[in-house]
Image (cartoon, grey):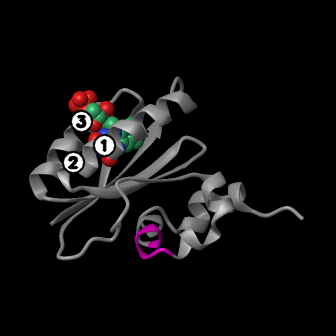
Amino acid sequence: MFRIAYRSRLAGSTSQHDIEDIMKTATERNSSLGVTGAWMVCDGDCIASIEGPPLAVKQIAESIWDDPRHTGFRLVSMEHTEDRLFEGWELKFLDAGTVKDDPKLLEHPGVSWLGNLAGGTEKFFGDAIVYHH
Ligand SMILES: Cc1cc2nc3c(=O)[nH]c(=O)nc-3n(C[C@H](O)[C@H](O)[C@H](O)COP(=O)(O)O)c2cc1C
């Protein structure tokens, strides 16, 4: 098993429709190749991870870094591992809305690992997930 994590920024022209399109392709392709992962987005900033068979991860990663819907792709982690961090998630999408709806997601081991690569989930989402009473 192989796992990578990367950061990038959504392109200015990337819309909600594009995100839905990416998620549709990603869930189909990841599940057919035995890949799992998570994708966190806040104010256009992205941090994401995919894990699975090494060749599948490499193949998908090549598509991702060529994708014009985001820019500044940089790898922040790459490791061989025995265990999945994102078991059951073909590609979990997390933005401020999803996290507000289900704050427990921040305690998920994979999500907190990924968030730590960006200085912590709280820092990554920042004011976007502050609750206003
Ligand atoms: C931030 C981001 C994350 C993506 N994550 C995945 C993913 O996990 N799996 C996947 O198959 N495609 C993902 N995509 C879509 C790929 O870039 C690509 O469009 C898709 O895999 C189809 O590959 P192809 O364009 O080489 O045919 C992602 C795209 C972006 C912008």
| Local SS, label 2 | helix
Question: In terms of secondary structure, where does tag 3 sit?
Answer: helix
Of the pair 87 and 13, the residue shown nearer to us? 87
Say whether marks 2 and 1 touch (CB < 8 Å).
Answer: yes
> Looking at the image, is mark 3 or mark 2 nearer the viewer?
2
* Residue 64 lies in the magenta stretch: no
Image-quarter location of ligand 1: top left
Cα separation between marks 2 and 1:
6 Å
User: Would you identify the image quadrant in which residue 130 lies?
Assistant: bottom right
Residue 35 spot, x, y in % from top left: 24, 55
Q: Which disc, if any, is residue 63? A: 3
Name which of mark 3 and mark 2 comes first in the sequence: 2
Is 111 magenta? The answer is: yes
Q: Which kind of residue does numbered mark 3 sit on?
A: Ser
Q: Residue at x 41, y 71 (%)?
A: 113
Q: Quadrant for residue 22, please give it.
A: top left
Q: Nearer the viewer, mark 1 or mark 3?
A: 1
Label 1 SS: helix
Q: Is residue 8 left or right of residue 1?
A: right
- Give the camera-side residue of 131 and 124: 131
- Give the magenta range: 108-112
Residue that label 1 marks:
28
Report whether residue 72 is seen.
no
The kind of secondary structure the magenta stretch mainly shows is helix
**Amino acid at pointer 2:** Ser
Does the Cβ of the disc 1 residue fall within 8 Å of ligand 1? yes
Indicate whether 16 appears above or below 95.
above
* Between discs 1 and 3, the one toward the N terminus: 1
Question: What percent of the width, then of the height, locates residue 56?
Answer: 15, 50
Disc 3 to disc 2, C-alpha distance: 15 Å
Name the residue located 40 percent from the left edge and 38 percent from the top edge. 24
Q: State whether label 3 is within 8 Å of ligand 1.
A: yes
